[in-house]
Image (cartoon, rainbow, N blue to C red):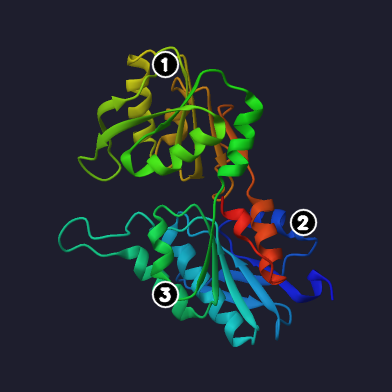
Amino acid sequence: MSLKDEVGLFSGRANPALAKKIADYLGIQLGKMEIRYFSDREVYVKINENVRGEDVYLLQPTSPPANENIMELLIMIDAFRRASARRIAAVIPYYGYGRQDRKDQPRVPITAKLVANLITTAGVERVLTVDLHAAQIQGFFDIKVDHLFAAPIIIDYFQKKKLLDLVVLSPDMGGMRRARAYARRLNASLAIVDKRRPMANEAEVVRLVGEVKGKEILIVDDMIDTGGTLMAAMEVLQKEGAQAIYATCTHPILSGNAYEEIDKSPLKELVVTDTIPLDKGRIKSKIKVLSVSSLLGEAIKRIHENRSVSSLFV
């Protein structure tokens, strides 16, 4: 039997464009499903085709509005479980609440774990995700987790640009491992911004470690939310005499005035992926979007065929 006879790919409303690209990669049609609100904003889901005995993949990043998208995902999972799908996998390109992965102060929750519990209890057997904010979140699940990385896609793009005298910069200590991997693949030097956060969504640079004067800089992060960390890093880089500044992230949340701040910044280019759909009306020429559809599509294909996906993890 062909893949289209054995696999169902269905999409919530969070990122249907990415789901369509994945379906095209797999050579299948997106499954038929109705999702709408009742007048009081309760979510209604109805599957409009037979899925009994099928392996189904439900694509739904839990990006803003995170609470609505998480609830929609949970209801989708329950609908497919009650429709007798054989196996259900949640494809979550962006895992919302990933920043709340530990108790870093008294009397706070570990919400990343709570969300993992909700998804598991709803009835999935596997989660497929991209660039978790903290790798330890994989351990919050008691089911199989395939944690993919967008780095090969992004690195390939920058290799083709042939930037000279490149320095890869991590905007904080937590991103050093990611930056080191980029620097190794791009044959670049490494630098880091030592920062602290006075409060959530605010960043204050303490010092810069590394030589950046006269260099081309690539700032590497897993996500950009308000853009505060990026702006603070660029400010210190300009003061230290950086020649040109590029930036990349997997998950472009871009909340608040982030689009406008990026557009008027000294940034040459911001390279992101389509794990989260962007506001097309606010995208400026500085933002370049790369697709993770082939990465996720290939992972789905290999999982279904019981082949190794380890080569996609690097």
Q: Amino acid at mark 3?
A: Leu
On screen, residue 194 above or below 125: above
Evaluate whether residue 225 shows in this view.
no
On screen, residue 66 above or below 1: above
On screen, residue 312 above or below 58: above
How crowded is the residue under tag 1: few (<14 C-alpha within 10 Å), some, or many (20+)? some
Q: Which residue is mark 1?
A: 242
What residue appears at the point 49 percent right and 75 percent down from the top-left corner?
Answer: 143
Evaluate whether residue 83 shows in this view.
yes
Q: Element at badge 1?
A: loop
What percent of the width, then of the height, locates residue 57? 64, 70
What percent of the width, then of the height, locates residue 283? 56, 34
Considering only order in the chain, which callout, 2 or 3, is on the residue closer to the N terminus? 2
How crowded is the residue under tag 3: few (<14 C-alpha within 10 Å), some, or many (20+)? some
Q: Which mark is residue 313?
A: none
What residue appears at the point 16 percent right and 64 percent down from the top-left corner?
Answer: 107
What percent of the width, then of the height, locates residue 293? 66, 52
Q: Nearer the viewer, residue 180 or 201?
A: 180
Q: Mark 1 or mark 2, which is nearer to you?
A: 1
Q: Element at badge 2?
A: helix
Q: Amino acid at mark 2?
A: Asp
State left or right for residue 10 relative to residue 232.
right
Q: Nearer the viewer, residue 259 or 26?
A: 26
Among the 4 quarters of the image, the one containing residue 180:
top left
Alpha-carbon span between mark 3 and mark 2: 30 Å
